[in-house]
Image: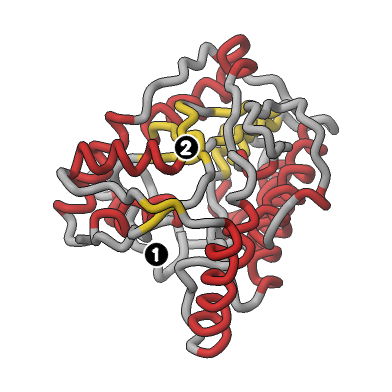
Amino acid sequence: MRATSNLKNLEGLKAETTTGDLRDSASLEKAMAGCEVLFHVAADYRLWVQDPAEMYRSNVEGTRAILEAARKNGVRCVVYTSSVATVGFTGNGHPANEDSPVALADMIGHYKRSKFMAEQVAMEAGRGGMRVVTVNPTTPVGERDIKPTPTGRIIVDFLKRKFPAYVETGLNLVDVRECACGHVAALEKGKSGERYILGGENLTLKQILDKLGTIAGLPSPKVKLPYFVAFAAGAVDQTVSGRLLGREPRATVETVRMGKKKMWASSGKAERELGWIAMPAENALRRAVEWFRANGYV
C-alpha cells in the first residue's frame, strides 16, 4: 500500500501491512521478504489519465519490478491479476476466450494497452522458470468498491439517476467474492505461463440497468443512445472535463469505442482446470447497491 492509501477494507484483517510503491523496487523487495506466495492485484485502473506515462510506469514497469522482487526473494508462486480487457473481442457478441486472436494494436486506450503489456511480462516470466499464473477477471461487482472503480461508478451513477439513456453494449459481470476465490484456485491448480478468465454472467448494459432498477426500486432508462451521439458526448466531456478542467471525465471517446464490442467472455478453461463455477450477477449487484447506499455514495 502507499502512505496515502485508504485502509478501510483492511480493517479487522489478521495481516501485516507494509508501505511501498510499484515504482519503488526497493520497497517491493523489502515487503516481500519471507513471503511464500504473491497475489499481484495492484494496478492503475482508470479509463482516462492526464499523464499516460504514469499508468505504464505502474502497470507495466511495476509488474516487471514486482516479479523481479519475487524472484530475488524465492517466492514459490505468483498469481498475476490481469483483466478481461486483454482478451480478443469481436463485434458479433460471440463470447471470447483465452485463445481468441488478439494483439496490442487491438487494445483501445492506455489502460487496456498497459494491462496487455503487463500480462505479456507476467506470462513470459511464467514460461521462463518462475511459477506465474495469470487470471483475467471480467467485470467484478460487489461491496467495498471504495474508489469507486469505473465499474462501481456505473452503479453509483444509476443510483444517483444520472443514467438517462444507455448504449448498445455488453459486459460479463463476476461476483467479487467469487473472483477472490478464483485467485486462490489459480494458486492451487493453475498452470504456470497460462491465463484463466474468471467470469460470471454475460449481460447487455440494458439488462444490467434493468436488474439495478428492480433491486434499487428505480426506473431503468428506456432511451437507447445512437453510437454517433454517444461518441460526440464523449468527445465533449473529454475536452471540457479532462483537458480544460483537469478532472476525470464521466465518458471519453475511448470508452465509447470500447462499447462497440460486447465484452462477453467464456470461463470454460477455468471451469475445466480450476473448478470455477460461473454464477449469476444478481446477488453481487444487490450487495453493491446496499453497500454504496449504506456508505454515503448516494
Residue 5 got which mark?
1
Q: Residue at 57% of width from left, 44% of height from top?
A: 40
Q: Residue at x 55, y 39 (%)?
A: 39
> Which x, y percent locates residue 4?
40, 70
Q: Quarter of the image containing the C terminus?
A: bottom left
Q: Is residue 24 visible?
A: no
Residue 141 against residue 59 in the figure, above or below: above
State whether residue 30 is above or below residue 23: above
Disc 1 crowd rating (10 Å Cα; few below 14, some 14-19, many 20+) is few
Image x and y of residue 268, in percent: 61, 16
Q: Secondary structure at mark 2?
A: strand
Tag 2 near tag 1, CB within 8 Å? no
- Whether residue 254 is visible to the viewer of this picture, yes or no, is yes
Q: Callout 2: few (<14), some (14-19), or many (20+) C-alpha neighbours within 10 Å?
A: some
Q: Tag on residue 204?
A: 2
The total number of labels drawn is 2
**What residue do we see at 73% from left, 41% from top?**
122
Distance Cα–Cα, label 2 vs label 1: 34 Å
Nearer the observer: mark 2 or 1; the answer is: 2
**262, above or below 230, in the image:** above
Q: Give the structural element (helix, strand or loop) at label 1.
A: loop
Q: Is residue 193 left or right of residue 41?
A: right
Front residue of 132/269: it is 269
Q: Position of residue 3 (x, y in %)?
A: 42, 69
N-terminal-most mark, 2 or 1: 1
Say left or right for 220 vs 251. Answer: left
